[in-house]
Image: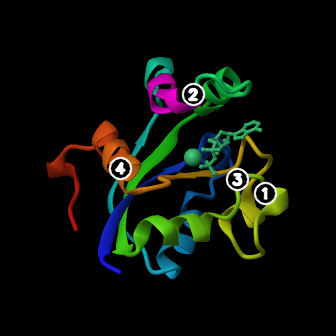
Amino acid sequence: MAVQRTFSIIKPDATKRNITGKIVSKLEEGGLRVVASKRIHMTEAQAGDFYAVHKERPFYQDLVNFMISGPVVVQVLEGEDAIAKNREIMGATNPADAAAGTIRAEFAESIEANSVHGSDGEDTAAEEIKFFFTDAEIVG
Ligand code: ADP
Ligand code: MG
């Protein structure tokens, strides 16, 4: 497998509880490197666009409201097979289904407030990175 980059968000439930460092440690221990990072407070328009793929889902507006309820940390992660590896370290969407030791099993509060986002494929990773970062902001 080749070295890849993927996009990650530490969500408002985690920034609120001051556990961004614990989450980054899990990612680093899993073999991923943070090559770009910034703490931002998303606008409603940004969160709505970012999650546009879920527009028709019943939880869409709640999800947007949650994502703008506090600051988030957006980051680019790099490593061997980074897209799948990040998803593995994150665990399943619903923390009740997440494997022991994963970020969501350890830290998520609910299926919505589940502490982290991670890109689900090569195309979405490239799009999501571009949505938040310029090339100059990514330093490998
Ligand atoms: P993932 O983040 O694991 O890729 P999805 O892309 O399916 O999961 O969903 C995006 C986000 O929407 C989830 O991380 C979670 O915050 C929220 N979400 C997903 N399913 C539900 C649900 N059934 N009820 C409330 N929020 C949900
Ligand atoms: Mg997803």
Instruction: Give me the residue at 40% from left, 47% from top.
Output: 124
Residue flagged by tag 2: what amino acid is it? Ile
Which residue in the structure is indicated by mark 3?
93
Instruction: Give me the residue at 47% from left, 29% from top.
Output: 42
Which corner quadrant of the image does residue 70 belong to? top right
The answer to whether 126 appears left or right of 134 in the picture is: right
Closest to the camera, between mark 1 and mark 4, is: 4
Residue flagged by tag 4: what amino acid is it? Asp
Closest to the camera, between mark 3 and mark 4, is: 4
Count of all numbered marks drawn on residues in the image: 4
Closest to the camera, between mark 2 and mark 4, is: 4
* Residue 140 point in image, percent of width and height: 22, 68
Measure how far apart labels 1 and 4 are at the Cα level. 26 Å
Q: Mark 3: is the Cβ under 8 angstroms from ligand 1? A: yes
Q: Do the residues labelled 1 and 2 touch (CB within 8 Å)?
A: no
Which residue in the structure is indicated by mark 1?
95
Q: Mark 2: is the Cβ under 8 angstroms from ligand 1? A: no
Of labels 1 and 2, earlier in sequence is 2
Label 4 SS: helix
| For residue 19, above or below residue 56 | below
Of labels 2 and 4, earlier in sequence is 2
What range is drawn magenta here? 47-54
Instruction: Give me the residue at 66% from left, 20% from top.
Output: 61
Count neighbours of disc 3 (C-alpha within 10 A) and say few if under 14, some if 14 to 19, many if 20 or more: many
